[in-house]
């Protein structure tokens, strides 16, 4: 019997999980290690146990459901994504990948397909990083074989530590065995929404992801001198806001317009002391820099630093640029990308190759096993937003391609 995706079952499951942490505007607030996240984990564990899949979790709260193969000694094909969301997140970011992967296990089971190698579902912990940093914590811990001690002291806005969140979340599934992160796997496949507009605009059903852009985050601080807004002439000002404004205007006018592959974002900015009638003493902002090559990242970082320093000098200020995070670019193996394309062809889905501008759990798993990703379109490319939407036909088609790709790999 040929395995088939049960469209009605998959769509109903997505609705059921979207109800956990549902927001009034149709989105989801299911932040990592929250009560809502635990409820979603419990539902997934319940569904897996009902099918007879073997459950386990690791100390990073990654949750696994394994469909046995005929050779239990072989490492599994791992498939999945994440269930945690942004505070005002969408219904499909992450959840589509987890539930489509679970549907693949069920489709194999319904058809009575016997595989030599086990196939295992994973729901990674804290991919979003909205409550605790770093993001993609579960997949990082899996790739590194454990949790870094400094991660455990990370706090959310209420002062709850990651250590406490992990402890309480593990305890919420008392019947599921706990192990150290990092058991052997043979390969990894992840379905995710594109989180961009390309596939929808081109009318393409599937993106075969070739790799993931590298990312560098910086914490930039300009320091000048606080002064009275009304009595301090220009010649006497050391204004860090003027310096920051000059630098950002130059960066926005030159970085992205000069290189279609680079992404530059300033998502957070604050002035101190923050008085309406005082020149600030300090201005601090974040910079998110992305490029598909290390060489490109380094070149744009050099340009970034030069512009920031020039603006500081022009306004009598100092500037510090502190690296916050770095993720190297990832290129997925050519044979894994080919496999996704062949899976799309077998499922009758149009497809194209595409680079991921966002980092995903596959960023880290690619370091320990051959990995690939496939993207489904989302309406207007909107994600991390309550209005995030994927058409039912696109959901089902993406699951069908994931199933076809899994079967090809298992052969």
Image (cartoon, rainbow, N blue to C red):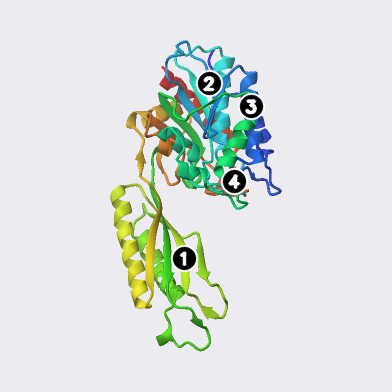
Q: Is residue 369 shown left or right of residue 230?
A: left
Distance, label 3 to label 2, CA atoms, is 18 Å
Q: Residues within 10 Å of mark 1 (few under 14, many from 20)?
A: many
Q: Position of residue 168 (x, y in %)?
A: 62, 36
Image location (x, y in percent) of residue 144: 41, 35
Q: Earlier in the sequence, mark 4 or mark 2?
A: 2
Callout 4: helix, strand or loop? loop
* Residue that label 2 marks: 66
Q: Residue furthest right?
A: 24
- Residue highlighted by disc 3: 174
| Res. 250 visible in picture | no
Q: Count the marks.
A: 4
Q: Are marks 3 and 4 in contact (CB under 8 Å)?
A: no
The quarter of the picture where the C terminus appears is top left
Tell me which residue sits at (53%, 21%) in the image. 66
In the rendered image, the quadrant that contains the N terminus is top right
Q: Secondary structure at mark 1?
A: strand
Q: Please give the label number shown on residue 388.
A: 4
Number of the front mark, 3 or 4: 3
Number of other residues with Cα within 10 Å of mark 4, as a class: few under 14, some 14 to 19, many 20 or more: many
Which is more foreground, mark 4 or mark 2?
A: 2
Eye-nearest disc, 2 or 1: 1
């Amino acid at each position: 019997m040929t395995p088939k995706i049960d469209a009605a079952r998959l769509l109903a499951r997505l609705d059921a999980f979207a109800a956990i942490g549902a927001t009034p505007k149709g989105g989801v607030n299911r932040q990592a290690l929250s009560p809502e996240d635990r409820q979603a984990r419990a539902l997934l564990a319940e569904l897996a146990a009902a099918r007879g899949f073997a459950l386990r979790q690791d100390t990073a709260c990654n949750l696994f459901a394994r469909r046995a193969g005929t050779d239990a000694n072989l490492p599994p094909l791992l498939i999945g994504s994440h269930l945690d969301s942004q505070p005002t997140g969408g219904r499909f970011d992450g959840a589509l990948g987890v539930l489509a992967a679970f549907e693949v296990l069920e489709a194999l089971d319904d058809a009575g397909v016997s595989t030599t190698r086990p196939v295992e579902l994973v729901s990674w912990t804290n991919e979003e990083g909205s409550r605790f940093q770093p993001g993609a914590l579960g997949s990082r811990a899996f790739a590194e074989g454990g949790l870094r001690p400094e991660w455990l002291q990370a706090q959310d806005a209420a002062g709850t530590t990651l250590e406490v969140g992990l402890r309480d979340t593990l305890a919420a599934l008392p019947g599921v065995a706990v192990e150290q992160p990092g058991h052997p796997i043979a390969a990894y496949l992840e379905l995710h929404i594109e989180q961009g507009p390309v596939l929808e605009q081109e009318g393409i059903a599937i993106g075969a992801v070739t790799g993931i852009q590298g990312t560098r985050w910086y914490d930039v601080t300009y320091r000048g001198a606080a002064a009275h807004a009304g009595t301090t002439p220009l010649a006497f000002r050391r204004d860090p806001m003027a310096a920051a404004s000059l630098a950002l205007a130059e960066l926005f006018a030159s970085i992205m317009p000069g290189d279609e592959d680079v992404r530059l974002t300033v998502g957070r900015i604050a002035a101190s002391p923050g008085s309406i009638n005082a020149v600030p003493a300090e201005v601090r902002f974040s910079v998110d820099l992305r490029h598909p090559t290390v060489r490109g990242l380094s070149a744009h970082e050099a340009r970034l630093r030069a512009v920031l320093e020039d603006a500081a000098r022009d306004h009598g200020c100092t500037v510090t640029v502190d690296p916050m995070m770095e993720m190297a670019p990832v290129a997925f193996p050519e044979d894994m990308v080919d496999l996704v394309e062949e899976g799309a062809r077998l499922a009758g889905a149009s497809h194209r190759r595409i680079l991921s501008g966002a980092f995903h759990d596959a960023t880290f798993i690619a370091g320990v096993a051959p990995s690939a990703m496939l993207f489904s379109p989302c309406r207007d490319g909107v994600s991390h937003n309550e209005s995030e939407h994927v058409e039912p036909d696109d959901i089902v088609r993406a699951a069908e391609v994931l199933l076809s790709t899994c079967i090809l790999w298992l052969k």
